[in-house]
Image (cartoon, rainbow, N blue to C red):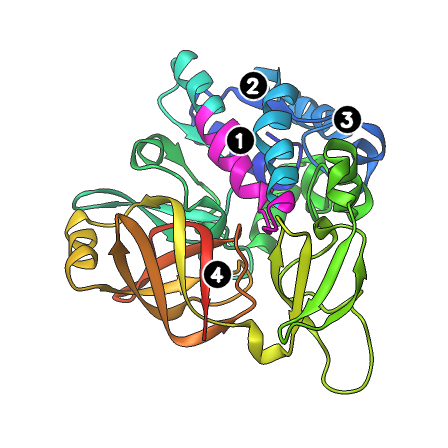
């Protein structure tokens, strides 16, 4: 229970259905302006909101101090990824570690039969076990963020909101008299004050602000930058101007502290290699990928629709080759694969290790 409307309604629906509900809130951070910023979660007022909601429902509520775990597994990983020239997704790391690993262990220790969350995804029982599917509400679907959920975890997890649209969830909260009914959704990265991620990185890894060259693809040095952590693939803002077509960040060489820029067409990616992959599809399909390749729908951004691609395995590592080049694919981001025969089903995914230009 993060204190927001989604997790509050999840608890209320299960309580209404007659389940013995235990509410758990994680205190993940508690520093400066991030605690009080609008749209945050898991700190300050949000914890109090979760406690009050649990009291109103008459269910027990616990607050677990996960600050040190969150800092080590999510925040520091976030800073290190930027130092490597990657574009991290801390929400995926948070789900992968403190929520679906550490908290799930606590739920089992409590003797719970299942752990329910307010994520907008669907869990369906298939012939070979539980499957992960996109939410009914495409605008709220969070399946891209949950690709790292393992088969064992999925067997234990429940997602009561996956079949609902957001207005329905708020209407349920209002009908139950829950204070969270009108509470704004969480926005941006929860632990980043005022949306300035460099504030966090500079505090944790100050050497990330070492200067370097901004270099055109043709080898020309166009200017200087104040740290590779200020740039992400596809970025246009903050680059040298001048005559001609606009320039975009197309690659980051963190070792040489170089930001490489070029025209928009240089952002096109033909294929990519995945690391830390997780497979939820049938093992037969994975075997096909190892032998001859497997048709998939690949999604490289949470806001982008999956695109036709082909999955292969090379030296044991997944490779995804797009039927048509994708733009702005960045190392550190996620590539999530869906089933072409049933596009709502998540087959698996991984973090992008490297890309091949079109």
Residue identified by numbered label 4: 300
Mark 1 or 3, nearer chain start: 1
Mark 1 or mark 4: whose residue is earlier in sequence: 1
Type of secondary structure dominating the magenta stretch: helix
Q: Which residue is mark 1?
A: 11
Gap in angstroms between the C-alphas marked 1 and 3: 20 Å
- Answer few, some or many: residues within 10 Å of disc 4's Cα (few below 14, many 20 plus, some between 14 and 19): many
Query: Which of 38 and 302 lies nearest the eye of the viewer?
Result: 302
Query: CB under 8 Å between callouts 3 and 2?
Result: no
Check disc 4 and report its element: helix, strand or loop: loop
The image quadrant that residue 140 belongs to is bottom right
Residue at image location 39% in from the left, 63% down from the top: 298
Q: Nearer the viewer, mark 1 or mark 3?
A: 3
Q: Nearer the viewer, mark 2 or mark 4?
A: 4
Residue drawn 77% across the image and 26% down it: 44
Sequence-earlier tag: 1 or 2: 1
Q: Secondary structure at mark 1?
A: helix
Whether the residues at callouts 1 and 3 have beta carbons within 8 Å, the answer is no
Image: magenta residue range:
82-101
Q: Earlier in the sequence, mark 3 or mark 2?
A: 3
Write down the residue under mark 3: 44
- The picture places residue 68, in percent across and down from the top left corner, at 63, 20
Q: Secondary structure at mark 2?
A: loop
Q: Which residue is mark 2?
A: 59
């Amino acid at each position: 229970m993060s204190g927001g409307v989604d997790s509050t309604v999840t608890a209320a629906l299960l309580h209404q259905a007659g389940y013995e509900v235990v509410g758990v809130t994680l205190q993940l951070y508690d520093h400066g302006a991030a605690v009080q910023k609008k749209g945050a979660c898991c700190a300050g007022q949000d914890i109090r909101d979760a406690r009050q909601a649990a009291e109103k429902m008459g269910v027990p509520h616990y607050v677990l101090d996960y600050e040190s775990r969150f800092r080590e597994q999510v925040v520091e990983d976030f800073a290190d990824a930027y130092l490597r020239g990657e574009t991290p997704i801390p929400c995926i790391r948070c789900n992968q570690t403190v929520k679906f690993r550490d908290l799930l262990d606590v739920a089992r220790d409590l003797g719970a039969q299942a752990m329910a969350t307010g994520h907008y995804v669907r869990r369906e029982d298939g012939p070979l076990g539980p499957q992960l599917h996109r939410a009914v509400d495409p605008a709220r679907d969070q399946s891209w963020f949950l690709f790292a959920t393992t088969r064992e975890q999925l067997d234990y997890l429940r997602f009561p909101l996956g079949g609902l649209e957001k207005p329905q969830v708020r209407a349920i909260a209002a009908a139950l008299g829950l204070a969270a009914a009108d509470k704004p959704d969480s926005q941006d990265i929860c632990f980043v004050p005022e949306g300035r991620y460099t504030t966090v990185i500079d505090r944790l890894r100050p050497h990330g602000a070492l200067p370097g060259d901004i270099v055109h693809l043709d080898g020309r040095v166009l200017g200087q930058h104040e740290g590779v952590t200020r740039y992400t693939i596809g970025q246009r803002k903050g680059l040298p101007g001048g005559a001609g077509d606009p320039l975009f960040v197309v690659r980051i060489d963190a070792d040489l502290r170089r930001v490489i820029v070029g025209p928009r067409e240089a952002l096109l990616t033909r294929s990519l290699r995945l690391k830390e992959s997780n497979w939820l599809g049938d093992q037969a399909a994975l075997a096909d990928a190892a032998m001859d390749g497997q048709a998939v729908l690949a999604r490289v951004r949470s806001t982008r629709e999956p695109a036709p691609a082909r999955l292969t395995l090379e030296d044991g590592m997944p490779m995804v080759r797009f039927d048509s080049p994708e733009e702005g694919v960045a190392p550190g981001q996620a590539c999530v694969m869906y089933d072409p025969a049933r596009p709502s089903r998540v087959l698996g995914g991984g973090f992008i290790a490297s890309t091949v230009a079109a």
